[in-house]
Amino acid sequence: SLTTLMEIRFLLRRKKSYSIPQIENDISRLSAIFDVIIPDEISLLKANTIQADHLLDPFDSIHLALCLGIKPVTLISRDKHFIKTAKKFITVKTPEELLKII
């Protein structure tokens, strides 16, 4: 989703020592590989409800709401807290688990 790309950009800028051109190049490459979903009002309202009911940050709430709207889906994450919550709704794998399957 667009918010996932925004979160990736934010994390790479804040926590990693990547240059801005490198980050933007990587974001462009991801955008070319995956369909980028833009959250609509329904998804954002669902995300608000999810966040109210579960201790998720806004990005994770939106991501989960979008996943719920495109079932069947497998969510990929390393965030243990997010995985625990998301597993209540959908299939979730870590990148390492996914690589063992494919």
Image (cartoon, rainbow, N blue to C red):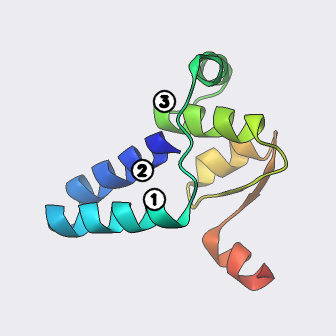
What separation in Å lies between label 2 and label 1 (alpha carbons)? 8 Å
Between 97 and 29, the residue placed more toward the observer is 29
- Vertical arrangement, residue 37 with respect to residue 52, above or below: below
How many labels were placed on the picture?
A: 3
Helix, strand, or loop for circle 3? Answer: helix
Q: Would you name the residue on which mark 3 appears?
A: 58
Q: Is residue 18 visible?
A: no
Q: Is residue 14 visible?
A: yes
Between 101 and 35, the residue placed more toward the observer is 35
Which numbered mark, 2 or 1, is in the foreground of this view?
1
First in sequence, mark 2 or 1: give its number: 2
Is the residue marked by circle 2 packed among few (<14), some (14-19), or many (20+) residues within 10 Å?
some
Q: Would you name the residue on which mark 1 appears?
A: 31
What separation in Å lies between label 2 and label 3 (alpha carbons)? 14 Å
- Vertical arrangement, residue 72 with respect to residue 59, above or below: below
Q: Tell me: 86 left or right of 55.
A: right
Picture quarter with the C terminus: bottom right
Picture residue at 66% right of the left edge, 24% below the top:
50
**Type of the residue with mark 1:** Ser
Q: Give the number of the disc on residue 5.
A: 2
The percent position of residue 15, horizontal first and vertical second, equals 25, 59
**Type of the residue with mark 3:** Pro
CB under 8 Å between callouts 2 and 3?
Answer: no
The percent position of residue 18, horizontal first and vertical second, equals 20, 69
The percent position of residue 46, horizontal first and vertical second, equals 67, 20
CB under 8 Å between callouts 1 and 3?
Answer: no
- Vertical arrangement, residue 31 with respect to residue 58, above or below: below
CB under 8 Å between callouts 2 and 1?
Answer: yes
Q: Quadrant of residue 68?
A: top right
Which numbered mark, 2 or 3, is in the foreground of this view?
2
